[in-house]
């Protein structure tokens, strides 16, 4: 599909002759340099380094936990991120992170428009990478178009082969890096190449290799325009104060070449219709047609236009980041607000405030959370057991979570139940007191059946406390209020 | 409608020709790759229809050349599960029942297996969790046992049942129907009831209880013991404690003496395999009343034990 001539010229896409299905028009972005291009390089370098490199960072957690800094251990249901270990019941931290990511996107979009799309989105980063591969193998824009339209010569076949092999290598590396987040990276790498890894690992790599190859190598801007919901959501979140990549038509129109402008001073605007902004666009749009869904605001057209304006000695910024409000002001001859004033307004500040508040709340609760957790379940069948000496016994299932990566000894005690005695399956009633000691394996959940016996005289339903605390110097623990049942009167 | 088709000025795209209160729809072409995906789905569906059950017919559906069925898939899963459990089952089979509590992992597996089997075979009478049913079926969770609460006794009871007339090794005993058969008259039965309620701490001693004691020693003590401590070898319940299978109030006790229940439990050794019986025993043992030592009869304070026969 790539490299084909458009099926019909734009005029034929309309009216009675409109085809039901549109072929993709090839996009061959030209090489460009400038401030935004360099920023894009930096973002690409950082995001790819994070993606490929993170699983290889080591982090010492002692003998009972993995030493990989970031690890999603699905088999054991743990999520490790440097100092933080998340258990499944603490998944709300992940939910909180997702909410922060959502609000972060609100914040970014309301302030600087589709900056996420233009710089940080994986689809953008990988498409950018693949377009560099295109330039490396096929040459710049014109060479690419020539090659795409040319016949299948030996040169074209060999160039295509080389290019697709590089695509595949990048795609495979991308898929391979993904699985490293879910198992010990060095071990998995060896297992992977010796055929010892789990089938799901090979399947995941195959799927991600295929999607990276197709989405990054071929689908490219089609993903942004047809598949991704985010551009549609963002258009709803932007307002007249959001920064947009704007062609300042009041300055540029009517377009005319430098020669024409010299011949008729004052008759033409600054745009010399050199088409550089279109040539460099990675989604193949013309920014001069105004804001549109295809624009991911990567600002490469700003770099291209600034370069041309510099060469012909005109003021830069014919294409520039500009808000709709400022555009109206500048059109009327005024001067737009400074960028900082555009960024700092109630809406962005409120988003930022919410974002910070959630982050601070999560950090606070992370620092406060106890690593010894108790959950008590009252056995319902039978609710109570009549013992032969007239006492009543209730059974409870304790779930003791030792979230420390070391073995622990803890005490379980009952409080608020007169004459109570507790024992576990390993103990017996004869030796029972108000307290049992339990050994917990590191980083694990221990289920213990706790028998609680108390005198038969008392209310039919009575709340009491079961508490646990560490016996190894860290007395922090947890407690649960739970019900003790006795037979109703007359039973 | 086609006559209303026009080119939209802002986008240069044709409209579809429909118009609703001034709202028109652009006839934007679908991308080509979308079409290909659509065709690929059709090809996939055709293959699926041939390979898997698909078309509903009058009585069933087309079978599909792979012969896949959900029942077959379940069978394979069950077989895989059985194969996975085989090693631990054989380990449990090879371990003496009384040695199991010393091996926590085996014991835990046995209790889990027993819990599963209990839900299939036992809950109908004994209730979920062995809670029992008041005045019908005994609770298995308390510390009062008719036939013994250690592992071996429980296993024996499960294997051979209680009062199975067609089985020699079954646990059996029969309490006479003192009222129905006229062995004791109504007044005598009332006296015995008074005595039983005195030794179980529910009534204060009196003349009736004293008369009842004499009758008790003559008629009941042979099984229930002189002090009412019961005898597990014949399944005679202890009468001095707080646990009453058929009720400890005057009416219930009178009914029991007039016409005893002589409860029946089926035997299981010929229906389920020995490992499952073993696992059931560990489960019942684990419910809270399991006794560690060999069969013994608890003593009444200060009155001396009614030793085993």
Image: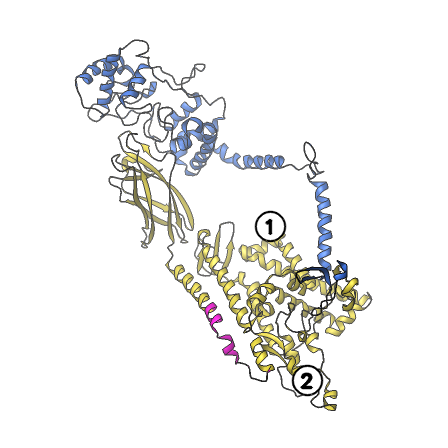
Chain colours: A yellow, B blue
* Residue in front for this viewpoint, A213 or A221: A221
Secondary structure under badge 1?
A: helix
Viewer can see residue B245 = yes
Using the rendered image of the protein, determine whether residue A22 is visible from the camera's viewpoint. Answer: no
Closer to the N terminus: mark 2 or mark 1? 1
**Quadrant position of residue A1:** bottom right
Dot 1 surroundings within 10 Å: few (below 14), some, or many (20 or more)? few
Q: How many marks?
A: 2
**Nearest the camera: A370 or B134?**
B134
Q: Which residue is mark 2?
A: A269
Which of the 4 quarters of the picture holds residue A354?
A: bottom left
Task: Pick the residue in front: A350 or A176.
Answer: A350
Quadrant location of the C terminus of chain B in the rendered image: top left
| Contact check, label 2 and label 1, Cβ < 8 Å | no
Horizontally, residue A230 falls left or right of residue A469, namely right
Label 1, on which residue?
A200
Q: Residue A185: x and y, percent?
A: 55, 57
Give me the C-alpha separation between circle 2 and circle 1.
60 Å
Is A350 rendered above or below residue A383?
below
Indicate the position of residue A89 as horizontal and vertical percent values.
44, 51
Secondary structure under the numbered disc 2 in the rendered image: loop
Q: Subunit of mark 2?
A: A
Which stretch appears magenta? A332-351
Q: Residue furthest front?
A: B21
Residue B8: image location, x then y, percent: 71, 67
Query: Does residue B219 appear to the left or right of A86 in the view shown?
Result: left
The answer as to whether the residues below labels 2 and 1 share one chain is yes
Residue at image position (38%, 37%) is A380
Magenta highlight on residue A345: yes
Give me the chain letter of mark 1. A
């Amino acid at each position: 599909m790539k490299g084909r001539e458009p099926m019909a010229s734009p005029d034929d896409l309309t009216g009675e002759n409109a085809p039901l299905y549109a072929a993709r028009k090839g996009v061959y972005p030209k090489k460009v340099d400038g401030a935004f291009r360099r920023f894009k390089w930096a973002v690409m370098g950082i995001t790819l380094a994070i993606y490929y490199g993170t699983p290889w960072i080591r982090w010492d957690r002692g003998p009972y936990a993995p030493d990989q800094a970031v690890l999603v251990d699905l088999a054991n249901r743990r999520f490790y991120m440097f100092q933080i270990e998340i258990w499944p019941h603490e998944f709300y931290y992940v939910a909180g992170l997702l909410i922060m990511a959502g609000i972060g996107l609100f914040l970014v979009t309301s302030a600087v428009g589709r900056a996420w799309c233009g710089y940080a989105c994986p689809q953008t980063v990988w498409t950018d990478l693949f377009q560099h591969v295109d330039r490396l193998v096929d040459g710049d824009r014109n060479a690419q178009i020539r090659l795409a339209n040319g016949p299948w010569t030996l040169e074209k076949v060999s160039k295509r082969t080389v290019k697709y092999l590089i695509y595949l290598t990048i795609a495979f590396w991308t898929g391979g890096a993904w699985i490293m987040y879910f198992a010990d990276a060095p071990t998995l790498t060896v297992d992977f190449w010796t055929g010892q890894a789990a089938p799901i690992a090979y399947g995941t790599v195959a799927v991600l290799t295929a999607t990276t190859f197709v989405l990054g190598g071929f689908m490219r801007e089609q993903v942004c325009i047809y598949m991704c919901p985010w551009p549609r959501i963002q258009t709803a979140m932007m307002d007249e104060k959001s920064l947009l990549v704007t062609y300042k038509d009041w300055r540029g129109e009517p377009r005319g070449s430098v020669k024409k402008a010299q011949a008729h001073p004052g008759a033409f605007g600054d745009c010399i219709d050199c088409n550089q902004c279109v040539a460099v666009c990675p989604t193949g749009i013309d920014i001069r047609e105004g804001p549109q869904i295809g624009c991911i605001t990567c600002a490469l057209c700003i770099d291209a236009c600034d370069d041309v304006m510099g060469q012909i000695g005109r003021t830069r910024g014919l294409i520039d980041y500009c808000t709709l409000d400022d555009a109206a002001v500048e059109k009327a001859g005024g001067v737009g607000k400074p960028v900082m004033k555009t960024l700092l307004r109630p809406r962005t500040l409120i988003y930022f405030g919410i974002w910070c508040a959630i982050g601070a709340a999560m950090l606070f609760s992370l620092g406060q959370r106890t690593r010894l957790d108790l959950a008590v379940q009252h056995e319902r069948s039978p609710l109570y057991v009549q013992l032969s000496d007239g006492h009543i016994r209730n059974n409870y299932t304790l779930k003791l979570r030792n979230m420390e990566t070391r073995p622990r000894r803890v005490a379980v005690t009952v409080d608020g139940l007169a004459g109570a005695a507790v024992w576990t399956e390993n103990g017996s009633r004869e030796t029972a007191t108000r307290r049992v000691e339990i050994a917990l394996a590191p980083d694990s959940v221990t289920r213990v059946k706790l028998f609680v016996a108390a005198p038969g005289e008392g209310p039919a339903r009575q709340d009491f406390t079961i508490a646990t605390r560490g016996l190894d110097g860290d007395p922090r623990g947890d407690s649960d209020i739970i019900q003790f049942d006795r037979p109703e009167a007359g039973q | 409608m086609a006559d209303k088709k026009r080119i939209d000025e802002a986008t240069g795209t044709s409209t579809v020709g429909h118009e609703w209160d001034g709202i028109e729809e652009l006839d934007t072409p679908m991308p080509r790759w979308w079409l290909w995906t659509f065709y690929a789905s059709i090809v996939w569906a055709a293959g699926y229809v041939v390979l898997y059950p698909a078309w509903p017919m009058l009585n069933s559906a087309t079978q599909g050349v792979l012969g896949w069925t959900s029942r077959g898939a379940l069978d394979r899963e069950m077989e895989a599960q059985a194969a996975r459990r085989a090693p631990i089952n054989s380990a449990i089979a090879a371990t003496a029942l009384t040695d199991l509590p010393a091996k926590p992992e085996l014991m835990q597996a046995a209790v889990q297996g027993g819990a599963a089997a209990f839900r299939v075979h036992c809950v109908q009478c004994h209730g979920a969790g062995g809670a029992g049913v008041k005045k019908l079926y005994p609770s298995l969770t308390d510390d009062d046992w008719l036939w013994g609460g250690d592992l071996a006794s429980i296993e024996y009871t499960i294997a051979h049942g209680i009062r199975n007339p067609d089985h020699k090794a079954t646990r059996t005993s029969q309490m006479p129907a003192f009222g129905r058969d006229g062995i004791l008259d109504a007044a005598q039965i009332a006296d015995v009831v008074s005595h039983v309620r005195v030794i179980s701490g529910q009534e204060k001693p009196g003349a009736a209880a004293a008369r009842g004691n004499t009758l008790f020693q003559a008629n009941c003590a042979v099984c229930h013991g002189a002090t009412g401590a019961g005898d597990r070898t014949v399944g005679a319940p202890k009468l001095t404690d707080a646990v009453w299978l058929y009720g400890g109030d005057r009416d219930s006790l009178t009914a029991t003496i007039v016409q005893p229940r002589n409860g029946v439990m089926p035997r299981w050794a010929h229906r389920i395999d020995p490992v499952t019986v073993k696992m059931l025993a560990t489960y019942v043992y684990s419910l809270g009343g399991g006794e560690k030592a060999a069969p013994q009869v608890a003593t009444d304070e200060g009155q001396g034990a009614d030793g085993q026969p």
